[in-house]
Amino acid sequence: MITTDICIIGAGPVGLFAVFEAGLLKMRCHLIDALPQVGGQLSEIYPQKPIYDIPGYPAINAQTLVDNLMDQIAPFHPTFTLGERVETLEKQDDGSYVITTSDGTAVRCQVVVIAGGLGCFEPRKPDIVNLEQFEGRGVAYMVKNPEQLRDRRVVLAGGGDSALDWTIFLADIAREVTLVHRSDTFRGAPDSAEKVFELAQEGRINLVLQSNITSISGNGHLNQVSITAKDKTVTSLPADNLIPLFGLTPKLGPIADWGLNIDKSAISVNTTDYATNVERVYAIGDINTYPGKLKLILCGFHEAALMCQSAFKYVYPSQKLSFKYTTVNGVPTF
Amino acid sequence: MIQFTVEDRDGTRQMLDVPEGFSLSLMEVLKGSNYTVLATCGGMALCATCHVQVLAGLDSLPPAQDAELDMLDTLPDSDFDSRLSCQIRVDERLEGGIFRIKGAEQ
């Protein structure tokens, strides 16, 4: 069990800067992020893009900002759990919390700070009524172990690169492969698209274009999918497995079940200190919402500073907080 | 003024007037006009929650860039007339257009 003062969920710019503000108040931090590296969107999505609204920097490269933040918080020795998604939040008798990740890592802390940005990226699901009923019973949103599809009748849906790649790969493994795509063209890698058309011509896969899967059925386990073509004709196809591959979309994930007030996929907070409705749980940065909310890094930094002033009372209940400027006191390390 | 029509998920249509010269995306205008558009990613063509179908005026819009096309490609319900409203700048090219809101409500 990892023990710390503040457990920060999300190691993006706002989560990282919260370590600095906490450190000034002698509070230690542990950060958890679902991504394998720190920096959140900045490192994952636009590392080479310049950002123009960080105070004091006319322009700064996103990855440089992350690197600078890591330098800035180094004196406070934050610890990290990366590549793991938070799952559960359990309140302890003394008011503290234990957070557990998907990989079983447990963190005990006095205060929880959710700095989760967009949330975590989860598979986008097509609009099929009873889809969830068959999850794990023939329906999956990724191929974890292709061997499990050996000699099965597999239906894939989607038109992106992963749909094309898996169609080609499974053509040699599965008994029957059907790719269903809403359009008659593929914008994915031209080589893969060509290969898929070739396989279809050779009769090694079924290619069903300008069509959507509109319903599925089975007795406990999936055994049939119904496909509606553009001209509204419906055909049914026996299938053991359905793999919809429609990319990833950001979701709150398990945090949505923590009893927090949620408004349109964001966590409602009090703007005095960015506290949520659950005591000792705060939300800062893009993941929170309040009247006038702006999703800006600089607003997240401000929220981090105010949050720490409020969190102090839970970490040091018997001490009085006196505010100090770094220009007067420097950066007291530990 | 730039005038175009927005069709909500329930089919109701409304004409919007946007002053010229505002540097806003269609997604921002829709949100500002109280339509339920999540725009989770804030306009980076990452979440597709601002998906719209362009029922009229598709050809006068500037073509989609790679990031937008890649994202549209992954959607289960996108079509030839699909766009991400966050990638469309509101200017005179939208005049007379009709946009149907498609993105997820939650």
Image (tube, coloured by chain):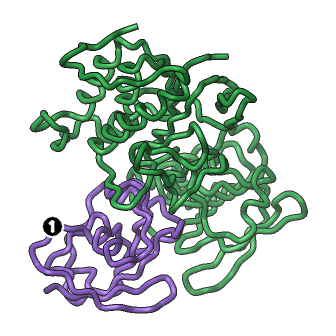
Chain appearing in green on the rendered image: A
In the figure, is residue B95 to the left or right of B72?
left
Mark 1 surroundings: few (<14), some (14-19) or many (≥20) residues within 10 A: few
Q: Subunit of mark 1?
A: B
Q: Which residue is mark 1?
A: B23
Q: How many numbered marks appear?
A: 1
Q: Where the C terminus of chain B falls, by quadrant?
A: bottom right
**Nearer to me, A90 or B7:** A90
Question: Is residue A94 something one can see in this rendering?
Answer: yes
Instruction: Give the secondary structure at mark 1.
Output: loop
In the figure, is residue B68 to the left or right of B96?
right
**Nearer to me, A165 or B10:** B10
Q: Amino acid at mark 1?
A: Ser
Position of residue A116 measured from the top left corner of the image (x, y, whole percent)? 47, 41
Q: Which colour represents chain B?
A: purple
Residue drawn at x 18%, y 39% as measured from the top left = A50
Q: Residue A227, located in which quarter of the rendered image?
A: bottom right
Position of residue B85 measured from the top left corner of the image (x, y, whole percent)? 32, 69
Q: Residue A40, located in which quarter of the rendered image?
A: top left
Position of residue B18 measured from the top left corner of the image (x, y, whole percent)? 19, 81
Is residue B43 placed above or below A68 in the rendered structure?
Answer: below
Question: Is residue A81 something one can see in this rendering?
Answer: no
Residue ranking furthest to the top:
A334
